[in-house]
Amino acid sequence: MSQPPSAARRAWGWARLLLAVVVSACALAGVVRLTVPAAAGTSAEPPGVRRQLAFLRAALDTGAGDEAQALFPEGYFFLHALYGLSWVELGMREPADGRSRALREARWALSRLDSPAGRAPFSPGLTPPYGVFYRGWSNWLRGGVLSLEPAGRRDPAEVRRFAEDSAALGAAFDASFDAGGSPYLAAYPGQAWPVDSTVAVASLRLHDAILPARFGGTVERWLREVRRRLDPRTGLLPHRADPGGGAPAEVARGSSQSMIQRFLVDVDPAFAAEQYARFRELYVVTPLGLGPAVREYPDGVDGPADVDSGPLPLGVSLSATVVTLGAAQAHSDAPLASALAGYGELAGLPVDTPWTKRYAFGLLPIGDAFLAWAKTARPWVARPPSAPAATVSWWWRTPLLILLTALAAAPWLSALRRRFRP
């Protein structure tokens, strides 16, 4: 006569059943996240971004900017800047009379940049004051705010400040050219990163698009000098440059290239298309055959991780991968943008509520800010370029879907074998 199962055995059986249900449910949720569109191109609103921004605003209101500042030198600045820029991007998708919230939030973010806390990491003794990083990103956001309003309704003080800051940037570039030809201004004393100057020059293009044009000659000189100082290994703008003459000081890297490729399309679309094609060739990879990702160093080169790249599993930079989503979208590369967005929905561990959305359980709001900014990317000055040849096939999800389906089925295989055993 068989004995009834003990309480311990019953509890173990229920625990195994619960674990099987959880594993299968998570795997099937991954299938859904991988297949539901996560990007919306340059005209429609990306799904979930407003809820991401709701999470970010709450986080900023409770000190996330200061926490980000403790992680890297521009943490406070970047978190507020990306929040404001994402709202500008959403506002550009709204009719002119429906942009009040976007304007309010973008102006709030801009006020945080234009504060002692926003300027704290930067040197007032640089040219222009506080350096090209601070001036370039602030100017880009300020121009974005102005672009959301018709010319007749713009705040004259905002227009005047944008014109003055643009003039200061233009004069700094012209003085640098006259002194030695370097197209890369300093962000910190004795340190220059080409990505920062790319943002600043894009803001001059934006000035000439919304106010009377005056910086065309400066931008053309910048482009000529940049072409003479490309990284010899990759043919791209270098990651770091000599602050004096502008010679490449470090090989092009994914963490800066992903931003450069987004802004360069508004500086010179033809040059940007050449640079973007080269960037995809050398940096966009499929590690282990499981979806697209972006290397920090060009294929065949290894280097150390740092605060810009984050950890580098298999040479991949998670930050560069996220920001490349925005670059791909700005270049009309819908297959790559869609694949990176879909991969992010799977690997980013998003937590959804009716009111907010956060990735990686909301532990690093700066990551959410970069992702929201990437998903909303679009050219601000240039017309959307023609789509480049696709490098991501429609079946890129297949290996991941097979793995997830196998994971969902695995907990039930032994029970099925017992049920159908002869």
Image: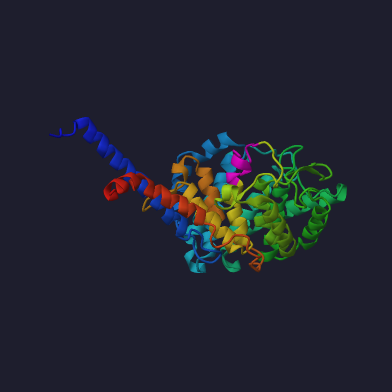
One can see residue 265 in this view = yes
Relative height, residue 222 to residue 17 (above, below): below
Q: Where is residue 161 in the image (x, y as percent from the top left)?
A: 65, 54
Q: Where is residue 258 in the image (x, y as percent from the top left)?
A: 65, 51
Is the stretch drawn in magenta largely helix, strand or loop?
loop
Residue at (45% x, 56% y) in the render: 48
Relative height, residue 410 to residue 212 (above, below): above
One can see residue 352 in this view = no
Which quarter of the image is occupied by the N terminus? top left
Residue at (52% x, 55% y) in the render: 341
The extreme left residue here reads: 1
Instruction: Residue 314: say if magenta.
Output: yes
Q: Residue 158's quadrant in the figure?
A: bottom right
Instruction: Residue 230: say if magenta.
Output: no
Between residue 79 and residue 329, name the one nearer to us. 329
Between residue 221 and residue 417, name the one nearer to us. 417
Q: Residue 75's quadrant in the figure?
A: top right
Q: Position of residue 392 (x, y in %)?
A: 59, 60
The segment highlighted magenta reads 305-319
Q: Where is residue 295 in the image (x, y as percent from the top left)?
A: 64, 46
Between residue 78 and residue 143, name the one nearer to us. 78
For the rendered model, the colour scheme is rainbow
